[in-house]
Image (spheres, rainbow, N blue to C red):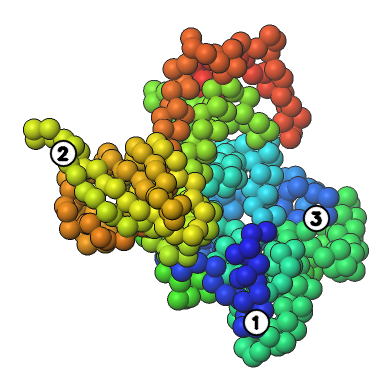
């Protein structure tokens, strides 16, 4: 835990209420009609859902369940109904009249809100269960589409800056510091009690302690399943074996599950509403993250779904729920995730002073005074060079060849060409050569061009530039590397066919990755 995190927790304790971590929210908040809330419950020890609640913010959710989550056909019918709503909400090709396109606008983003990370893990279970299912009858196609979408959503959540799926508990933890242990603040009900309860610190502690007694995870409190459901399920199964499952028992099971699902769904809606009504604005840099999210959705899911029904569009490479089973794909995805991770702060820091202070404390930002401005260009060429004095006491990671971006003017960039100690050891003198937007005014400070001598004497803040674009280009070069270094790893041929057994017991044989990506249509 960082010193800043400890300080925030102590501040929250002193104030008797959670305190904002930053001055902006670092993820998108779409309009209520574009935010679908989904909650699951399951039987202990089972991976398939026992019941699902779904619906958009502000409307009564659809709540459906089955008498016994171990009956595969009943669960398949339940998931088919859910799939129809989810696929339409996410505007997936082949399942809506209005599929989202490659050039989607920022305001076209659709989100799915889940109560916590364990509900997120249920997406992986749906991917495992249905993406390659051979069962389902008339629902087989839509169940497979659900499995593929759930798999993409689950995988995308490991990418820094993802926007389509929101873990409500994590969203609140990222926005607020709570005066309690992290293990307790992972509980959505506990967080909300701290946030919405009126009164002093003691009142909030009492409310939060009571709220955390009611589980939010997909697996229900064992006492509920043991005391209220076990006998009912056994009676229903006994009737089913005799060919007449009792409807009254099924209704009693549903009543218990509805209460559980309703609490999880409405807690998540409450989290969305609290963030939407909070005084914290969404960081303007999030628009760039939404653009990345749209690109990921198109290339990693939407385009593949389009190819499923139209082979003329090219082969449809379906990622297996277990692992990549494809060297080139794995290498490319790793680099894309690394690129998004490297560039994440760069999109947000220019619009959030708290993030800038955090960067200063980490040595990733600095404040310097301009002492000299010269133009080293010849003829019509403009090569602005600044000399700046760095005298702040904060630690700095700046080195020769470091690239700096003026705080508040993303797009401008300068490289450190020389670094000299100021006489007496009172600071460091940096020589900066501007490399991008050299003739364009900065969007910060006095808003003058880098060559303007009016900058002399001005104090300006900088943040360290990232290499996200370079890493992204490397991810694209992976596909053309079959004859280059490392080809044995990303383009090698398997010594023997790999057999994969799916959740239904069926077996698939994967060929080497080059053939799979270039010839496979499944």
The CA distance from mark 3 to mark 1 is: 41 Å
For label 2, count other residues whose C-alpha is less than 10 Å away and answer few (under 14), some (14-19) or many (20+): some
Outermost residue to the bottom: 199
Q: Quadrant of the N terminus?
A: bottom right
Residue 185 position within the rendered picture, expressed as x and y whole percent measured from the top left: 69, 67
Which residue does the image show at 59% across and 12% down from the upper left? 488
- Would residue 406 be found to the left or right of residue 453 on screen? right
> Disc 2 designates what residue?
382
> Disc 1 designates what residue?
14
Mark positioned earlier in the residue sequence (1 or 2): 1
Helix, strand or loop for disc 3: loop
Position of residue 484 relative to residue 211, above or below, is above
Which residue does the image show at 18% across and 37% down from the upper left? 376
Q: Which mark is residue 43?
A: 3
- Would residue 436 be found to the left or right of residue 283 on screen? left
Residue 203 appears anywhere in the view: yes
Position of residue 56 relative to residue 375, above or below, is below
The CA distance from mark 1 to mark 2 is: 54 Å
Position of residue 328 relative to residue 140, above or below, is above
Mark positioned earlier in the residue sequence (3 or 1): 1
Q: Viewer-nearest of labels 1 and 2?
A: 2
Residue 292 appears anywhere in the view: no
Mark positioned earlier in the residue sequence (3 or 2): 3
Q: Quadrant of the C terminus?
A: top right
Determine the image quadrant of residue 44.
bottom right
Residue 163 position within the rendered picture, expressed as x and y whole percent measured from the top left: 48, 53
Q: Which mark is residue 418?
A: none
Mark 3 and 2 residues: CB-CB less than 8 Å, in contact?
A: no
The CA distance from mark 3 to mark 2 is: 69 Å
- Residue closest to the eye, 415 or 82: 415
For label 1, count other residues whose C-alpha is less than 10 Å away and answer few (under 14), some (14-19) or many (20+): few
- Residue closest to the eye, 312 or 477: 477
């Amino acid at each position: 835990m960082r010193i800043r995190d400890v300080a925030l927790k102590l501040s929250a304790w002193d104030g008797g209420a959670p305190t904002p971590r930053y001055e902006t929210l670092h993820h998108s908040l779409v309009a209520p009609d574009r935010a679908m809330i989904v909650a699951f419950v399951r039987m202990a020890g089972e991976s398939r859902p026992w019941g699902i609640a779904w619906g958009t913010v502000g409307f009564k959710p659809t709540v459906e369940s089955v008498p016994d989550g171990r009956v595969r056909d009943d669960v398949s019918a339940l998931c088919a109904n859910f799939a129809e709503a989810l696929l339409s909400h996410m505007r997936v090709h082949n399942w809506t009249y209005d599929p989202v396109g490659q050039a989607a606008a920022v305001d076209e983003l659709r989100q799915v809100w889940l109560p916590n990370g364990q509900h997120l893990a249920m997406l992986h279970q749906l991917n495992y269960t249905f993406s390659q299912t051979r069962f389902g009858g008339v629902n087989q196609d839509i169940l497979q589409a659900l499995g593929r979408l759930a798999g993409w959503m689950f995988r995308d959540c490991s990418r820094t800056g993802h926007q389509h799926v929101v873990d409500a508990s994590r969203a609140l933890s990222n926005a607020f510091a709570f005066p309690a242990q992290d293990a307790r603040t992972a509980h959505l009900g506990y967080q909300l009690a701290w946030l919405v309860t009126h009164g002093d610190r003691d009142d909030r502690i009492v409310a939060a302690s009571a709220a955390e007694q009611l589980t939010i995870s997909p697996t229900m409190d064992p006492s509920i399943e043991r005391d209220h459901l076990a006998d009912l399920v056994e009676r229903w199964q006994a009737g089913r074996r005799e060919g007449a499952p009792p409807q009254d028992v099924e209704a009693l099971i549903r009543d218990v599950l509805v209460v559980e699902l309703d609490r999880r769904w409405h807690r998540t809606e409450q989290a969305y509403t609290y963030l939407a009504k909070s005084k914290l604005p969404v960081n303007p840099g999030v628009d760039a993250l939404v653009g990345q999210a749209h690109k990921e959705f198109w290339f990693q899911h939407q385009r593949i779904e389009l190819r499923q029904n139209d082979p003329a569009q090219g082969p449809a490479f379906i990622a297996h729920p277990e692992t990549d089973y494809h060297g080139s794909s794995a290498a490319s995805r790793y680099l894309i995730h690394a690129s998004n991770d490297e560039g994440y702060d760069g999109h947000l820091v220019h619009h959030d002073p708290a993030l800038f202070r955090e960067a200063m404390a980490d040595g990733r930002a600095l404040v310097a005074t301009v002492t000299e401005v010269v133009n080293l260009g010849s003829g019509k060429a403009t090569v602005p060079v600044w000399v700046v004095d760095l005298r702040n006491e904060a630690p700095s990671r700046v080195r020769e060849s470091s690239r700096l971006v003026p705080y508040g003017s993303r797009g401008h960039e300068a490289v450190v060409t020389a670094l000299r100690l100021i006489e007496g050891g009172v600071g460091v003198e940096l020589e900066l050569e501007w490399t991008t937007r050299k003739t364009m005014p900065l969007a910060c400070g006095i808003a003058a061009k880098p060559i303007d001598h009016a900058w002399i004497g001005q104090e300006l803040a900088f943040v360290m530039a990232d290499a996200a674009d370079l890493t992204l280009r490397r991810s694209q070069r992976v596909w053309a590397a079959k004859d280059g270094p490392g080809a044995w790893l990303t383009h090698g041929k398997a010594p023997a066919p790999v057999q994969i057994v799916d959740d239904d017991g069926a077996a698939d044989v994967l060929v080497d990755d080059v053939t799979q990506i270039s010839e496979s249509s499944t």
